Image (spheres, helix red, strand yellow):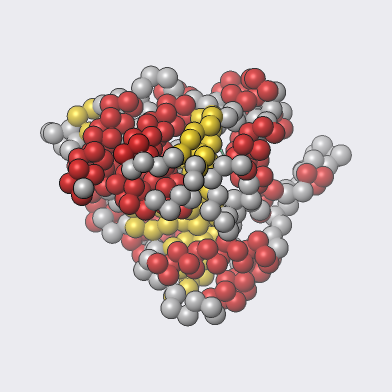
């Protein structure tokens, strides 16, 4: 049966990195005879320019009708200073909400060849292998519009609303991930201050009863921000609300060496998911071939795993990325010092990944 992937390149380096990931996917689909088609749609600033809105209805409909969505990045100085409802970021928040993608998976894992690029000491980084499960469609990001702008200009309100159901479904996802990993779950909140966090804790304790083999710990967000630096190796799965997850995942992303390496998956209960690199649109280097495509290529591996059940193909991508880094290939963001290191541009890096996949696939077959 034919499958469809909607590609939303977006802005800045988005088109370059999604092109790279599509080349890699295309190679795999041809090699393994999968019938998958790609459909491109607009989002973010690119959509503002042509359609006057960061999220055209056609984009939403196309995503809803597909098996998976691959997204580059949105935003750039060109659209700064516009009013809130025409900012590129609204396209991203809108598509997450429209597709109901409540669980955002952001892993942080040390890549051996990149450890010296981390701002932390090697011994702190080596054991790092955790995943942040960020709630993605609720909390402060989605306060009720009527309460966002009061008539009195000197006062604004952002509401942090969560229903038990919204907390439960993302926490359940996090427990399921923990069960497949090292069975440790850290639930992060601010229960010493926020009522929503106290409810979050209650829900976590309820869900925990169905997962007796997972060790659960509650931790405050400020202390977790500190623990991520002093002992990042202690974490396995971290689950937290939208805004805390946004902040902690940026912190986590630099631990392993480069923001250019980190993939993400945004999931819901069925198989439809949206896959995007954790990094942004990097307008300063757009169009120059300097962008690191690996975060998007690794996001494509997540796509194969979570949405298309192609675990073997996903594993090939992950092995290939490891392999090219071991050979010393790196884009300018990867601060590697090895003498064997070869600086490459976006498309050369993509070609190296495809070569490595081809070699690996030949070995297996
Ligand atoms: C992210 C980004 C977005 C977010 C922005 C661009 C709206 O920072 O994906 O983490 O805050 O969710
Ligand atoms: Mg962020």
Residue drawn at 62 percent across, 43 percent down: 64
Q: Give the vertical position of 218 relative to 302 (above or below).
A: below
Above or below residue 320? Residue 77 is above
Q: Residue furthest front?
A: 1
Q: In the image, 52: left or right of 28?
A: right
Q: Left or right: where does residue 176 sit relative to residue 318?
A: right
In the image shown, does 238 or 33 lie closer to the viewer? 33
Q: Where residue 211 sits: x, y (%)?
A: 49, 76
**Which residue is depicted at the point 39% across and 58% down?**
130
Residue 186: where, in percent of width, then height?
47, 66
Q: Please tell me in which quadrant of the rendered image residue 171 appears.
A: bottom right
Q: Position of residue 105 (x, y in %)?
A: 48, 53
Can residue 325 be seen at all in this image of the molecule? no
Residue 364 appears in view: yes
Judge left or right: residue 290 versus residue 335. Answer: right
Residue at 65% from the left image edge and 24% from the top image edge: 48
Q: Quadrant of residue 25?
A: top left
Asked where in the image residue 74 lies, by quadrant, the reply is: top right
At 53% from the left and 32% from the top, the residue drawn is 39
In depth, the one of 119 and 290 nearer the eye is 290
User: In the image shown, does 287 or 333 lie closer to the viewer?
Assistant: 287
Relative image position of residue 303 (x, y in whole percent): 45, 46
């Amino acid at each position: 049966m034919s499958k469809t992937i909607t590609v939303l390149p977006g802005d800045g380096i988005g088109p370059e990195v999604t092109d790279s990931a599509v080349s890699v996917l295309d190679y795999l689909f041809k090699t393994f005879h999968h019938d998958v088609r790609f459909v491109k749609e607009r989002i973010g600033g690119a959509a503002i320019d042509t359609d006057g809105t960061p999220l055209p209805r056609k984009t939403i409909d196309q995503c809803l009708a597909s098996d998976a969505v691959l997204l580059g990045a949105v935003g750039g100085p060109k659209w700064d200073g516009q009013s809130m409802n025409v900012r590129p970021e609204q396209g991203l928040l809108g598509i997450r909400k429209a597709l109901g993608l409540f669980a955002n998976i952001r892993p942080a894992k040390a890549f051996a060849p990149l450890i010296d690029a981390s701002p932390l000491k090697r011994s702190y980084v080596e054991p790092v292998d955790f995943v942040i499960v960020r709630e993605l469609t609720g909390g402060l990001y989605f306060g009720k519009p009527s309460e966002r702008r009061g008539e009195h200009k000197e006062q604004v309100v952002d509401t942090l609303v969560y229903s038990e159901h919204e907390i439960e479904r993302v926490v359940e996802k996090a427990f399921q991930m923990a069960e497949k990993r090292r069975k440790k779950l850290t639930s992060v909140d601010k229960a010493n201050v926020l009522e929503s966090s106290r409810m979050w804790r209650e829900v976590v304790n309820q869900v925990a009863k169905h997962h007796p083999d997972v060790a659960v710990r509650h931790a405050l967000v400020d202390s977790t921000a500190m623990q991520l630096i002093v002992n990042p190796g202690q974490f396995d799965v971290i689950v937290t609300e939208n805004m805390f997850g946004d902040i902690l995942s940026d912190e986590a992303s630099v631990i392993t060496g480069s923001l250019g390496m980190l993939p993400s998956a945004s999931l819901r209960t069925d198989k439809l998911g949206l896959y995007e690199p954790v990094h942004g649109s990097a307008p300063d280097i757009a169009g120059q071939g300097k962008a690191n495509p690996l975060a998007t290529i690794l996001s494509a591996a997540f796509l194969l795993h979570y949405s298309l059940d192609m675990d073997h193909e996903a594993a090939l991508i992950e092995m290939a990325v490891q392999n090219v880094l071991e050979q010393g290939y790196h884009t300018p963001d990867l601060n590697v010092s090895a003498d064997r290191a070869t600086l490459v541009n976006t498309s050369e890096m993509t070609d190296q990944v495809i070569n490595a996949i081809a070699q690996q696939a030949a070995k297996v077959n």
